[in-house]
Amino acid sequence: MLKQQASIFRRIAIALDLVIIVSSFMAAYYLRNEIGKLGHLRGYVWLLLFAIPILLTLLNSNNLYSSLRLRSYISIVWDIFKVYFVGGIMLSAAIFLLDPHHYSRLLFLFFLLISFLLLTACRISVKLLLAGFRRKGLNFRHILIVGAGQNAANLCELIHDHDEWGLQLTSLTINVYDANDSATYAGASRTVHSIEEIVDFCKKNTVDEVIFAMEKNNDYNIEEYIAELQTLGLTVRVVIDFLSIPGASKETSLFFGEIPMLTYSNFTFNSNQIVAKRCLDIIGALAGLFINLLMLPFIAVAIKLDSPGPVFFGQSRVGENGRRFICWKYRTMSVDAEAQKEALMEQNEMHGAMFKMQNDPRVTRVGSFLRKSSLDEFPQFWNVLCGQMSLVGTRPPTPDEVETYENWHRRRISIKPGITGLWQISGRNRIKNFDDVVRLDIRYIEEWSIWLDIKIILRTPWVMLKRSGAS
């Protein structure tokens, strides 16, 4: 019954979106016509033949026809924005291919803006309305939690703190041997009885879903109870708690669509974020290479006049999960710099697996300027374009540095290295302890978002101009 209701609501939502899209186009047409006379409507309405399927498909792919019960308002607005960003690009391409000279750009912009605002207002209004109903005791789903201990307590607290979700704790089944459990179960009527009684309990009470929140050391074979509850037509969920790894994000998925797995990872990049980051990298790399092309003749001449040797310096570096690649820079040292490094190790100013020296005798005069201004790193935009590096990430280490890493240090090479990052904008050479560099890198990995990348990118030119912490 609940699935049938969901299907009906989905169809209503699609129909409503269809009405909004068409109405928005008509409103945009008449608004644009008020500003300046347009041609007949039939010369523009063809765009709806593309807009309707594109926008509805994108809305569906962003789960905007699924239940909004557990979605935040920000995530709803963000997903609708993504729909219109991608949809706007696709519709722009259709206009460019079919009517590039006569189609009104202002009409198109009005249409996108009006429909975006109306669709967003509609989704938010529906969510607010349903949340209001749920707070008044309407449209509830009745939840039975089976378990005891911290898992069950955490689940109870989460549901209790979000009454707008419309989940009502029907009861809490606690195993007999846990009857004296001291955990606090917020909002649950604590019923102490055996797990064997849950099927009869569900027959005699209103229950929409049963959630097993057992501790991982329980002795019960819950498969038979799940099978019986599904025979009753109930939705059954299981809290996965096989292993708790501090600091690791967890994701449940089907391995190649077949085998259910619980995945632990050190970062929380989802597929959309990875695509967004790669798009940002490509755009930034092309812009950086264009600027580098303008500077190349002047930098090349200065390097050649200052010291013998090549203009570029390629060095083996370690990238994502141990991948080796050649990292390119403008040459800032004498050609025998690597041979001299061993003799200078005692003067290393860094504590740990990184070599830094304030007045390194291997650095040329032009090289010193290039380093302080960070111009020496512009050839790395080629590494970014090739996918070996990112605009923002961790500093790419050399293989000999990685060989000295402690286990926890290796987390910094679990993502692509970057041209800039938290370490680079935090003073670079003012940080003398390698462990502090790693902590900054781990902080970046754990807190990553596309907006953090943009923030770091925007701060980097200022750091370059100040020559902050560079040598």
Image (spheres, rainbow, N blue to C red):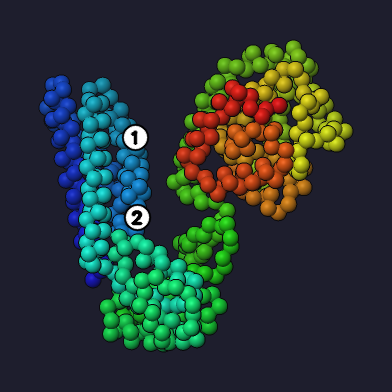
Q: Mark 1: which amino acid?
A: Ile
Q: From the viewer's perspective, is residue 184 above or below residue 176?
A: above
Give the quarter of the image for residue 400. top right
Q: Residue at x 46, y 84 (%)?
A: 179
Q: Where in the figure is residue 273, as x and y percent of width and height?
A: 46, 45
Viewer-nearest residue: 144 or 340: 144
Give the quarter of the image for residue 337. top right
Q: Could you tell me if the residues under marks 1 and 2 are in contact, i.e. CB atoms within 8 Å?
A: no
Q: Is residue 399 left or right of residue 47?
A: right
Which label sits on residue 71?
Answer: 2
Q: Residues within 10 Å of mark 2 (few under 14, many from 20)?
A: few
Q: Residues within 10 Å of mark 1 (few under 14, many from 20)?
A: few
Residue at which label 1 appears: 89
Q: How much space separates mark 1 and mark 2, taking CA atoms?
A: 26 Å
Q: Residue at x 53, y 83 (%)?
A: 219
Q: Is residue 315 left or right of residue 257?
A: right
Q: Residue at x 26, y 68 (%)?
A: 140
Q: Quadrant of the N terminus?
A: bottom left
Which label sits on residue 413?
Answer: none
Q: From the viewer's perspective, is residue 43 above or below residue 443?
A: above
Q: Is residue 149 visible?
A: yes
Viewer-nearest residue: 170 or 87: 170
Please tell me whether mark 1 or mark 2 is closer to you in this view: 2
Q: Quadrant of the C terminus?
A: top right
Give the quarter of the image for residue 114. top left
Q: In what element is the residue under mark 2?
A: loop
Q: Mark 2: which amino acid?
A: Arg
Q: Is residue 19 left or right of residue 165?
A: left
Q: Where in the figure is residue 359, as x and y percent of width and height?
A: 78, 26
Q: In what element is the residue under mark 1?
A: helix
Q: Where in the figure is residue 325, as x and y percent of width and height?
A: 67, 38
Q: Residue furthest right?
A: 343
